[in-house]
Amino acid sequence: MTTTMAQALNAALRDALKDDDRVLVFGEDVGTLGGVFRVTDGITADFGEDRCFDTPLAESGIVGFAVGMAMGGFRPVVEMQFDAFAYPAFEQITSHVAKLRNRTRGALELPMVIRIPYAGGIGGVEHHCDSSEAYYTHTPGLRVVTPGTAQDAYDLLRDAIESPDPVVFLEPKCRYWSSEEVSFTRSGAAMDRAVVRRHGKDVTLIAYGPMVATALETAEAAKDEGWDVEVVDLRSLSPFDDETVTASVRRTGRAVVVHEAAGFGGYGAEVVARVTEQCFHQLHAPVLRVTGLDVPYPAPKLERHMLPDVDRILDTIARLQWADTPVVAGA
């Protein structure tokens, strides 16, 4: 059936609540309101306030409470209302959520999911749009995943809730209302695997979350320029699927990494390093990046100037060292 990403997430939560009495959903405005983006719409009415409930506006308390619940045998799914609202809980996430299993030498698992609506594209004001993925992927002990499609929103959230490890689940806000045919049979790739969304032979676009649709749009536009573009959707940011990514780059010989977060110290730098180290002898050109600008998310009317778009990605592909491009001495 045709479903939006928000509806697919709602279905995943409902199915998890039905299948496992240990699953709980809580956070700011997830109950009666149904979430700012209506991802939890109707869940409290259908499952009761014991299974889906509102919490005080205290992110560190929400995550700390979830840690205790997970230690006690539950599977909490908590929501940080917006990406930049999650920072008060950062100490809990990095010091306790990520480290508890290691600290107890595996005696305690921490099966919990931290849902974070992230990135831009909705014209949000300050603190309502941010791309914080690099903070979480830099933290050992956390799984970090982000869906780029409605189907993956369902599949990845179901897998995340069943994972014995804590999962930071990054939901691209600008894709909540994108729709597609979704099967609720969970027949997709495993949670820690990347997928090739479009096959091509000239260059690999590596994207995730909000930029997957933009990369696919670019691949279509690139046909007019004579480029056959392959698109890889990472899905799992940590752990990283080297096998799928490097296999694609070795086939095409060129790669461009696309993400919305700022470029300096961004997640794409790690991707470039891994691809360069593992595919050096197959590369025909340096691996390039298209990223957001190194500034805080701007005011709504200026946001479009910051976000990567089709034209910027095409311009970057053109900068790759193509055989018919003249080389200028000293350039």
Image (tube, rainbow, N blue to C red):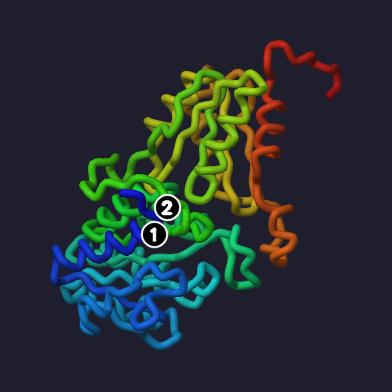
Task: Kindly report the distance in space between the C-alpha atoms of the residues bearing marks 1 and 2.
Answer: 6 Å
Q: Nearer the viewer, residue 3 or 185?
A: 3
Res 141 → quadrant: bottom left
Q: Nearer the viewer, residue 99 or 182?
A: 182
Which percent across, then down, holds residue 172? 49, 57
Q: Tell me which amino acid carries mark 1.
A: Phe
Q: Mark 2: give few (<14), some (14-19) or many (20+) Cα within 10 Å.
A: many
- The disc at residue 293 is none
Secondary element under disc 2, as helix, strand or loop, is loop
Q: Is residue 313 left or right of residue 330?
A: left
State the residue at coordinates (51%, 73%).
87
Q: Tell me which amino acid carries mark 2.
A: Thr
Q: Residue tagged by mark 1?
A: 169
Whether label 1 touches label 2, CB < 8 Å: yes
Secondary element under disc 1, as helix, strand or loop, is strand
Q: Nearer the viewer, residue 24 or 140?
A: 24
